Amino acid sequence: MPAPTNAQGEHEALPIAALLALAMAGFLSIVTETLPAGLLPQIACGLHISQAMAGQLVTIYAAGSLIAALPLVTMTQSWPRKPLLLAAVAGFLVSNSITGLSSDLALTMAARFLAGVCAGLSWGMVGGFARRMVIEPLKGRSLAIAMVGTPVALSIGVPLGTFVGNAVGWQNGFLAISALAAGLIGYIFWQVPNLPGQPAEQRLSILSVFRRPGVCPVLATAFTWVTAHYILYTYIAPFSVIIGFAGRVDLLLLVFGCASLGGIWLAGMMVDCKLRLHVLTSILLFAASISVFWMVPSIPAVVFLAVLLWGATFGGAATSLQTAASDAAGEGVDIVGAMLTTVWNAAIAGGGIIGAMFYHNGIARDLLPAMLALVAAAYVIAVAARRHGFIPGPRSKR
């Protein structure tokens, strides 16, 4: 039975089925992005290229998302939400099908770029879509459910996709994702309401949204926090050596992924009533986990605790950052979602670049001071954004 709605068409109870469709779109995006990383030798062999070149399948995906998110979301502000979501998922279906069938590098790269464009579009609109479905007191929890696809993909989807690719061939791994996209299209038709976009006369410019109080500090906090995270995530293999888990990266990522699921749940509980506390505490605990890796390596119980803290604090980061950015942007929720997508992808690239700069002589420990500096900057910015950005108190009383 559908949840009751108010005069504005907002659900007065969480529309779980519809929100899970948005979460599944996020799951699809993350698995599509990261699957090549686990299948580099097979892809390199299949396309007759080096593994370094095969790794560019991830890079060009990120480039498509980075380039497309803001202009596409800005252009489609007034479009109905359901057809737009369907177009993004159909793009994943097409791009993954081409990747799974192609033996030509140029065509495969073009397909991966298209997939990145679809990711930029979907991530730019999912947050606003989830929030528009429900009344004000439920917006934070609605967003948390819509964002759960990311940690699920990282903890379960990516290892499963890699297993399938290794078992039946890397191209069949991509075709399996295409089949998932086809099923999701049918589910969206069935369960997701068609909400209107922004009225044409209310369309906002990128600059006007960026200038709103609170938007800039939230984006700056996101960039510094996420960059620090991706330094650690990108270089987890060499880190596993210095913390005494050489060859057990899979175990560390499983612990991280499971803790991230708990972090999503915690963010859903706190984001509507204690968003500021959640953000500040998460950043501090992430700094504590980095310090453990630096100062107390090779003690398994302590390392596991640090990985749990890392996963739990970062699992809810997307929910809290998206909520704070959306609150600050007001009617510019879709544009700020695209801004956050752009910043997030820039942080992924930044994590790799900064990590390469500080990864001296193959010593992963040299990365930790850079990470702590970034986390400290994120904390200072978030603390300063008390009036606009990360505001204390329940969101419903503002």
Image (spheres, grey):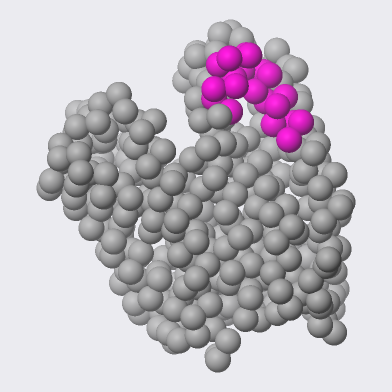
- Which quadrant, please, contains the N terminus? bottom right
Give the percent coordinates (x, y) of residue 157: 57, 36
User: Which residue lies at the image location 50% right of the left edge and 85% below the top edge?
Assistant: 394
Please indicate, yes or no, whether residue 173 appears anywhere in the rendered image. yes
User: Which residue lies at the image location 59% right of the left edge and 69% below the top edge?
Assistant: 141
Quarter where residue 31 is shown: top right
User: Which residue lies at the image location 68% right of the left edge and 19% below the top edge?
Assistant: 172
Residue 262 higher or lower than 63, as above or below: below
Give the percent coordinates (x, y) of residue 306: 26, 50
Horizontally, residue 311 falls left or right of residue 336, namely left
Residue 20 belongs to the span the image colors magenta = no
Residue 9 higher or lower than 74, as above or below: below
Residue 163 belongs to the span the image colors magenta = yes
Q: In this picture, which residue range is highlighted in magenta?
A: 161-180
Please indicate, yes or no, whether residue 124 appears anywhere in the rendered image. no
Quarter where residue 274 is shown: bottom left
